[in-house]
Amino acid sequence: MVKDLNAFFRSVVEQDRNPVVICDLSHEIVYMNPAAVENYGKRGGAGLIGKSLLDCHSPESREKIRQVAEWFAKSPENNIVYTSRNEKQDKDIYMVALRDGEELIGYYEKHEPRGRETMRMYHNVSP
């Protein structure tokens, strides 16, 4: 029996402790996971959904975002770009292409923490 994977994929993204912001090809924010809503709370949180990602950035950053989206569209092998380092939160930030097969359908912002995990191992599991 083949299960509908949408619920599984959505759960993976929603449980991620790192922000995930998904945009379509017109740069409209179509989804923010709970971590992103919290992370961008001072900028509007969930109210950013349906708005242009470009409106949240400087003119220089807007141009870089457009360039990356164009690069993603050039080849199905162009899929990830390192965009910045957040020293305060000890993480790197990337733009990642989203594809339906080889067709580019959008992109998302991926946060990768670099610090040591602070959560206790198996902290919520009891026998």
Image (cartoon, rainbow, N blue to C red):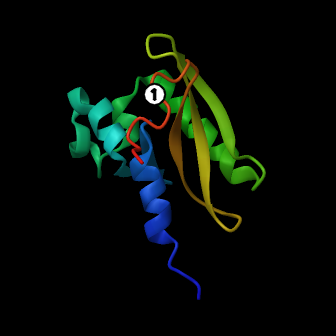
Residue 28 seen in render: no
Q: Position of residue 52 (x, y in %)?
A: 35, 44
Left or right: where 4 falls relative to 67: left
Mark 1 highlights which residue?
120
The residue at the point 36 percent across, 47 percent down is 33
The residue at the point 56 percent across, 21 percent down is 84
Viewer-side residue, 115 vs 72: 115
Viewer-side residue, 23 vs 36: 36
Q: Locate residue 18: give its quadrant.
A: top left
The residue at the point 51 percent across, 16 percent down is 90
Q: Position of residue 111 (x, y in %)?
A: 51, 32
Is 51 above or below relative to 84?
below
Q: Position of residue 20 (x, y in %)?
A: 44, 43
Viewer-side residue, 53 vs 7: 7
At label 1, counting other C-alpha atoms closer than 10 Å, the crowd grade (few under 14, some 14-19, many 20 or more) is few
Identify the image quadrant of the N terminus: bottom right
Most extreme residue toward the top is: 88
The residue at the point 43 percent across, 60 percent down is 10
Q: Which secondary structure lies at badge 1?
A: loop
Give the residue type that dot 1 points to: Arg
